[in-house]
Amino acid sequence: MPGVFVTGARGFVGRRVVDALVEHGHRVVGLTRSATDDPDDPPDPRIDWVRGCLTDGASYGGVLGEVEHVIHLAAVLSARRASDYERGNVLATRVLLDTCAAHNGRLRHVVVVSSIAAMGPKHDGTLLRETDPCRPRSAYGRSKLASERAARAYREHLPITVVRPAFVYGRGDTRAADHLRTLLLSLDRPWKTPIVGLSFVHVRDLAELCVRATVVDVPSGETYLVADPASCTWDDVRTAVVRALETLAARGRIAAGVAEHLLARARALDIVVRRGSRFEYWGCDTTKAREALGFRGTRSLQASALEVIGAYAEAGFFAAERWPGHPTTVV
């Protein structure tokens, strides 16, 4: 049974990657920093856990000789200081790969999961491609680009594959729930954004791609954009949200009063491009991943919105007390 060392195995994407690896018959070794087990978030029993820190290679180096593949998912997504991104994303990647090189000369694949934030948007209406110059807009994006470059520095010594997913969504994504709530509560004025087009990728498709990258042999150091089959506009996003809310209301998953309130807000959502801003296009061309890795995105935003928003309903996201002025509750 092939062994896979996974960083970030307890995260939103990591949990789905573990699911996919187990389904494909892999033994999973996960790195965790937890000094004690959280009773509300117990360790996955399917994983052989190693307690340690990414920036301390000695804490996990011993297990790297027992695996054939590494999938690096752990990352700092939000931080107050650029130095936190540097340590959590760039230094952590360097130490991990240095430790891989020192402890295992037989690794078949090292998959480094980055982000399209490492690229930044285009402004000419065309899709992002791997050959485009990278101009990240955020400290997070700059750190992910630096971590990619750190990974490629090992391409002569390790079989490196860099994966750049688009905006990841799916069941269990709490950050998307926060964004949706903010969006639906901010309709007293137009919601302004410079973003015109964007791509998403369902977390399960991304997970399958990560597993696929441990099977297919490609040149070391190559980068692959990963996204759903079609890019979207904000009108597409609004339509997907409205249809999902309508379906959930019809099935009794959201109380009528709350559903009516939210549907009125969603239908009235006015998204405008910020005046004076350059248009930003975050849509992705996934031809390279399709041809080299056999990636086939199987889900679309329209089809998956019901699954995602339905999960929010199960978790009490649409409880009346969260939406002022409506005494009804989720059924």
Image (spheres, rainbow, N blue to C red):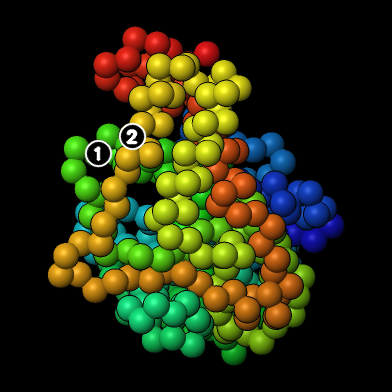
Q: Are marks 1 and 2 in contact (CB under 8 Å)?
A: yes
Q: Nearer the viewer, residue 272 or 202?
A: 272
Tag 1 residue: 187
Secondary structure under tag 2 reads helix
Near mark 2 (Cα within 10 A), the count class, few <14, some 14-19 or many ≥20, is some
Farthest residue to the top: give it: 327
Using the rendered view, name the quadrant where residue 305 is placed: top right
Kind of residue at badge 1 = Leu
- Residue found farthest to the left: 276
Rendering coords of residue 192 (x, y %): 23, 55
**Residue corresponding to mark 2:** 265
Q: CA distance from mark 1 to mark 2?
A: 7 Å
Q: Residues within 10 Å of mark 1 (few under 14, many from 20)?
A: some
Q: Is residue 125 visible?
A: yes
- Closer to the chain start, of discs 1 and 2, is 1
Say which amino acid is labelled 2. Answer: Arg
Q: Name the residue: 82% across, 53% down.
A: 25
Question: Picture coordinates of residue 83 (x, y %)?
Answer: 25, 64
At 55% across and 27% down in the image, what residue appears? Answer: 248
Q: Describe residue 95's horizontal placement relative to residue 290 as left or right.
A: left
Position of residue 59 in the picture relative to residue 185 (left or right): right
Q: Residue at x 55, y 58 (%)?
A: 201
Q: Give residue 86's position: percent from left, percent from top.
A: 32, 67
Q: Is residue 4 left or right of residue 144?
A: right
User: Residue at image x 40%, y 16%?
Assistant: 257
Whether residue 105 can be seen here: no
